[in-house]
Amino acid sequence: MKKYVLIRLFNIVVTLFIIATLTFFLMKQLPGSPFDEEKLAALPEDVRTAIYEQYGLNDPVWKQYIKYMENLVKGDLGKSFYYKDKPVAQIISERIGPSALLGIQAIVIGTAIGLILGIVAAFRHNSVWDYTTMILAVLGVSIPNFVFAALLQYFVGLKLGVLPIAYWESYKSTVLPTLALMFGVVSVVARFMRNEMLDVLNQDYMTTALAKGLSLRAIILNHALRNALIPVITVLGPVIVSLITGSLVIESIFSIPGIGSLFVESIKVNDYSMIMGVTLLFSTLFVFVVLIIDLLYGVIDPRIRIAGNKE
Amino acid sequence: MGMEKAHLTEEFFAPVATDPKGMESVARDPSIGWRAAWQRLKKNRGAVISLAVLTVIILLAIFGPMMTPYDYAQTDYEESFKTPSGDHWFGTDKFGRDQWARIWEGTRISLYIALLAAALDLVIGVMFGAISAVCGGKVDMVMQRIIDILVGIPHLIVVILLILFMKPGILTISVAMVITGWVNMARLVRSQIFKLKAEEFVLASRALGAGFFRTIFKHYIPNTAGLILINLMFTIPSAIFTEAFLSFIGLGLQEPLASLGVLINDGYHAMQSHYYLLFFPAVVIVALMICFNLLADGLRDAIDPKMKNK
């Protein structure tokens, strides 16, 4: 097991290196530069060259790449082009708070509600409960979350006037965006949970557990839930990463200073170092979450051997 | 006993001639299973109603635009923002275009996108995940790192670069979807097969001589069918909205073409004053999704061998 984790950690370094390299060269193909081209064109030739020179943009792309990677190894993500030379790491750390808080809240509450709905739906298969859950889950995925967000703003924020409609001011500001983000999580978790539960409920060990006279709670927690978790954690992994790194749509609807809007902005204005910074943040989170999920498979179901059959 | 053992020499253990194709022929005729599944599906009221509604929606997508004299692209500025009436059944948009014609034109495009997303998921996603899990070890390691890399590179950058090399339109959307559209399905199928690998029936089938692909198609995939169907329900709407997003940033469909996703996007901006522009396309997409789900669920109950006694 230790050996497997070590190999995986080495793999993670290689994967991140490949992602950084590909992203760097692809990003340099984007049209435009980090500067306002119109204003730049008005400057005399030598001033323009000097500006490019200062940011190292006159060098061939491979030279820029080597320079970036050298700094990256030292842990330096560079400075933003757009935010007046502010370090990328500082901007990201300022912006990650709101995104991560909303993301984590949405995941924790959404997963809890989803699990309960899914379990109830499975135990009451083909009943009103089951159909209601299913329709809720379908609504959660087939209505885009910006529509939910707008409806929440209108009815809860404007009509009832109990919660702030937008901006990042107090803890209350997190409620509506969290709800808007949560719908997706609830439907994913509920739908997969229901399906897996139906499967598990038909297994012989469930009959045994019932025959032994175990309480319903013990049956659900110790026998059913564990055996139904694998697909849920598999689909939840990427959802967690994308929610923590922020949703562009929700952040722009609620005017929240998060990572999602920062990233799209940085692509629009060719803020190279910022694009790389956010990409690396996202990929690092992603590869670690994937590793944790792979390790969890073995914990949840000891028969699963991801590391191969040799152990 | 001890004396008999002495007589058992190596020659006694010569392999019997094998017939790889006949080994697993104990399986019954598959057509019986399908007929039984159809019988069970017919008993499921939700699935039957869904099938009917889906048929109606598909027929409307084909014939709907012909039922009104207005064309989906025809603008009429004196008729803009008309509420639904006998003339314009679903009202008109800001350019006075008939919303009924636009919705069914859009349904056509969205159904194409849905079909493409489903096909990608089923062909690339399922096979990628299955091969990765069945081979395991180093193959799995490499295949999963490919997924990590595909997910890690920002999609938006790839999409913008695609505009530079290709014309905006359905083809470009399709290419953008091919790159990462199947990734979640692959990861899900992989996880399920890892679970199944430890089951006795797989061991039995292998002991009987089933080959690599036979095990995948005969044992792993049928036992993953429930999950595959459910994941499709998430892939399809997200593909429809990805298309809307791409169209929104100018990579996707060009005016006057519109998909359901684009219509919902436009309707959202006029939601407060002209709710019907958001309402009708949203109803079509939700109806499509609910019916698809109930049908998929009925299918699952009908074909899943473990559900038979229910």
Image: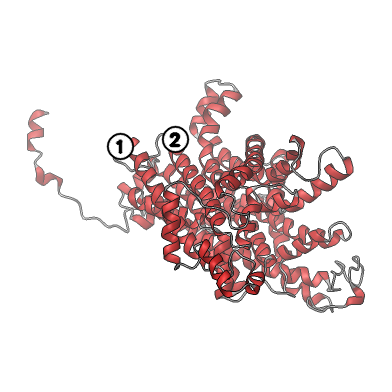
Local crowd size for mark 1, using a 10 Å CA cut-off: few (<14), some (14–19), many (≥20)? few
Indicate which label's residue lies in the foreground, 1 or 2: 1
Residue A245 in sight from this viewpoint: yes
Query: Which quadrant holds residue B21?
Result: bottom left
Local crowd size for mark 2, using a 10 Å CA cut-off: few (<14), some (14–19), many (≥20)? some
Disc 1: host chain: A
Please tell me which residue lies in front, A215 or B281: B281
Please tell me which residue lies in front, A32 or A222: A32
Kindly report the distance in space between the C-alpha atoms of the residues bearing marks 1 and 2: 15 Å
Q: Amino acid at mark 1?
A: Glu
Labels in figure, total: 2
Please tell me which residue lies in front, A57 or B107: A57
Label 1, on which residue? A311
Answer left or right for A174 relative to B274: left
- What is the secondary structure assignment of the residue under circle 1? loop
Q: Amino acid at mark 2?
A: Asp
Q: Quadrant of the C terminus of chain B?
A: top right
Residue A295, percent across and down? Answer: 43, 38
Residue A16, percent across and down? Answer: 44, 51
Label 2, on which residue? A301
Which mark, residue B137?
A: none
Query: Which quadrant holds residue B238?
Result: bottom right
Scheme of image coloration? secondary structure
Establish if B76 lies above or below A237. below
- What is the secondary structure assignment of the residue under circle 2? loop
For the point 81% across and 79% down, the residue is B74
- Mark 1 or 2, nearer chain start: 2
Disc 2: host chain: A
Answer left or right for B182 relative to A134: left
Residue B169 in sight from this viewpoint: no
Answer left or right for B46 relative to A70: right
